Amino acid sequence: MVVGMEQIATFSEASPVSPAAVGETVSGKAITVGFMLVERFSMIAFSSAIEALRLANRAAGRDLYRYSLWSEDGTKCTASNGIEIKVSGRFGDVQDFDMLIVCGGLDIQKADHRALHAALRRASARGSAIGAVCTGTYVLAKAGLLDGYRATIHWENLPGLMSEHEGLEIGSDLFEIDRNRFTCAGGTAAADMMLSLIMREHGPTVASNVADQLIHHRIRDSCERQRMDLRMRLGVAHPKLLKVVGLMEASLAEPLGSQELAEAVHLSTRQLERLFLKYLGRSPAKHYLRIRLEHARDLIRQTAMPLLSVAMECGFTSASHFSKAYLDCFGQPPSAERKVVQARALAQA
C-alpha cells in the first residue's frame, strides 16, 4: 500500500474547531517542518506527530505549520508496518526549514545515515530546531547533535543507546524539550511532545483543541514514565512482590541475593518464594534470571557490544553460564542471536 502526501497532509480544512484560537498565535508566519523518514519508521509515532500539526492548522483556521516528507532515496519510505509513504525529495535536498523531525523505528542502528546526518548538521548550523520521535534519537546522537542536551528514546532502545553514548544525558522520560532539541519515546508520546510544542508557540487554547480532536484526554507531562507501572505489567497488586521485582529490574549488572531481596521487604526467603510462586508461578530466582536475559537480548539486538560485555552487563560472570541460560530461555545461544541480527542488517544494506 502506498500513501501519498495529499492523503495525509491537508493544510487547510473547512469548519475549523475554534477560530478564536487564531488570536493566541504568537507569530503570523507558518512554521515549516520537515519530517525525515528512516526506513522501517514507526507509523504510530509519525502519525501522532504530523496529525497534531494538521489539527493545529484546523483549530486556528489557517496554516500554523507547513510540513513535507523526506527520505534517503527521495521517492518513498516504507514504515515498519509495510505501508509506503511518498515523499517530496531526498535528505540532501532539504534546506531552510524551521524544524526537522527524524522519524525512526525498527533496527535504526543497522542502517547508514550519512546523508541524513549531513542534512541535520547543515540545518542545525542554520539555526533550525532538530527533533526526533521513537528511535530517531539514535540518529541525532550519532550525528553529534545531542551533545550538551537532554534527550530520551523508546524504553526498549535505551540500554543500547546508553552503552554507545555514555557521555550523553539520556533519560527515560516520555519526552524531552531542551532548547532547540526535542525527542520522545515514540508511540503516542509523539502527540504529547507536539502538543507541548504547539502550546509554547500558539497557546493553550490551540493545544487543547488539538488534544480534544485526538480524543487525547490530557497532555501528559514530559517527566511521566514510558512503561506501565509494575502493577499493570505483572497483573498483581501485592506491594512487597512489586517492590522486589522493582529491585530486580534496577540491579542487573550486580544481581541481589535472595536474602537481600527478602530482607528488603521484611520477609524470610521461604515466604518470598511462596509469594512469587503464588502470584507469578515461578521462583524469585527464575523471574530474576528472565529479566536479566531479556535485557541481554535487547543489548545483542541493538548494539555491537561483545557478548562477554553483554554477559557482564547482565550479571553473568561466566560466558558458558550466560550461553547456557540464554539457550534454555530463548532456544538459541547468544552467538546465534547475534548472527541473525548481523544477517538481517546485511540484507537491509
Image (spheres, grey):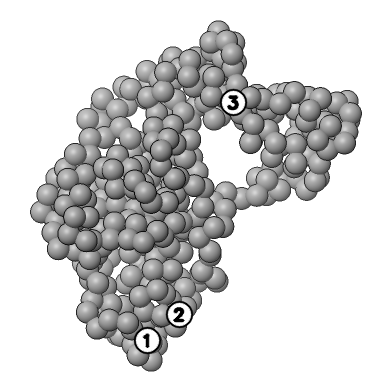
Q: Amino acid at mark 3?
A: Ala
Question: Is residue 50 at least partly visible in the picture?
Answer: yes
Residue 99, x across and y down, in percent: 26, 62
For the residues marked 1 and 2, what is the alpha-carbon distance in whole angstroms? Answer: 8 Å
Question: Could you classify mark 2 by the number of other residues whose Cα lies within 10 Å: few (under 14), some (14-19), or many (20 or more)?
Answer: some
Which comes before the other along the chain, label 1 or label 2?
A: 1
Q: Amino acid at mark 1?
A: Glu
Q: Are marks 2 and 3 in contact (CB under 8 Å)?
A: no
Name above or below for residue 21 compared with residue 211: below
Residue at point 69% right, 39% down? 246
Q: Are marks 1 and 3 in contact (CB under 8 Å)?
A: no
Residue at point 39% right, 32% down? 164
Name above or below for residue 54 compared with residue 239: below
The residue that label 3 is drawn on is 253
The residue that label 2 is drawn on is 204
Rendering quarter of residue 161: top left
Element at label 3: loop
Residue 83, x across and y down, in percent: 30, 50
Residue 252, x across and y down, in percent: 61, 28
Query: Which one is in front in this view, the residue at disc 2 or the one at disc 3?
Result: 3
Which comes before the other along the chain, label 2 or label 3?
A: 2
Residue at point 14% right, 45% down? 73
Q: Are marks 1 and 2 in contact (CB under 8 Å)?
A: yes
For the residues marked 2 and 3, what is the alpha-carbon distance in whole angstroms? Answer: 44 Å
Q: Find residue 24 and name its label.
A: 1
Residue 88, x across and y down, in percent: 14, 58
Question: Could you classify mark 1 by the number of other residues whose Cα lies within 10 Å: few (under 14), some (14-19), or many (20 or more)?
Answer: some
Residue 258 horizontal side relative to residue 222, left or right: right
